[in-house]
Image: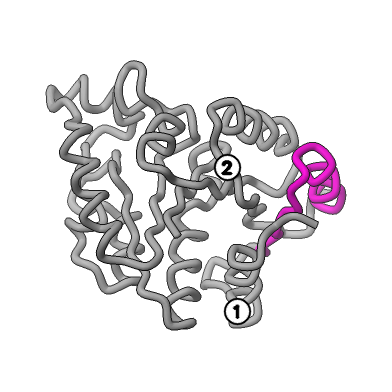
Amino acid sequence: MKLLITGTDTGVGKTFVTRHLALELKRRGLKVGCLKPVETGVEEQPLDGKALAEATGQPLNEVVPVSYRLPLAPYVAAKLEGRPLNLKALKEHFLTLKERYEVLLVEGAGGISVPLERSYDYAALAADWGLKLLIVARPGLGTLNHTYLTYHYARSKGLEVVGIVLSGAKGEDPSEETNPLVIEEMTGLRPLVLPYRPDGLTAEELKALGDYLLSGSRP
């Protein structure tokens, strides 16, 4: 299984979901690797990559092969820092990890249309690398539009979306009650709702996340 975990925006919980998915799949006996091809906003260490590396036991430079200091889209950060992204080398790194791990979780930056180069975004990367998609979205008000646009754009590029995770539900927004049903009506995919858990998911929630991915999200 080779999967791109993308988001409807930045800060929606991609790293949280990717990390916990890696932990649960490892617990089930699978050989799991993570890859965040590019991390931006890195001062000393790539913090998202560090969280993923700690979950899988991989070297940090294997998880994050490319980083930029500026907290911008990869294409913009690369341009302003004068260090163009080498897509060929990035794909070669991916192909090496693809052979090494049964499950490879590739975490994007921001959303699916965030550019790595001028005309090459994460949808293009997913198509080029043969990745299926897991979409991570906010659970509350505004997520219907963001989630459907992400789903529709992915499908328009010929990508298979295997599921949608609504991460960080607090039970304070009334739309959290209705959004899962409406998203299912809009996309045909049954979303998984994860509660807000700053200290990490419970064992039951981890199992639900693993089951969701492995069992399929269609009703």
Q: Is residue 91 left or right of residue 133?
A: left
Left of 29 or right of it: where is 78? left
Where in the figure is residue 87, as x and y percent of width and height? 22, 32
Q: Is residue 93 above or below residue 209?
A: above
Image coordinates for residue 49, horizontal then vertical, percent: 30, 56
Which residue, as the protein is rendered here, is positioned at the far top?
118
Sequence-first disc among 1 and 2: 2
Residue at 32% in and 54% down: 35
Task: Indicate left or right for 147 with 109 as reference.
Answer: right
Q: Nearer the viewer, residue 45 or 35?
A: 35
| Amino acid bearing label 1 | Thr
Name the residue nearer the viewer: 73 or 123.
123
Vertical order, 159 against 104 (above or below): above
* Span highlighted in magenta in the image: 175-195
Asked whether the residues under the numbered discs 1 and 2 touch, taking CB atoms below 8 Å apart as contact, a structural biologist would say: no
Name the residue carrying label 2.
Answer: 160
Q: Nearer the viewer, residue 176 or 128?
A: 128
Q: Main secondary structure of the magenta part?
A: helix
Q: Secondary structure at mark 1?
A: loop
In the rendered view, would you say 178 is above or below 103? Answer: above
**Residue 118 inside the magenta-drawn segment:** no
> Is 187 in the magenta?
yes
Seen at 79% across and 55% down, the residue is: 172
Q: Nearer the viewer, residue 102 or 70?
A: 102
The location of residue 185, given as percent across then percent down, is 84, 42
Residue 182: mark in rendering = none
Residue 202: assigned label: 1
Q: Label 2 amino acid?
A: Glu
Would you place residue 98 above or below residue 40 in this image?
below
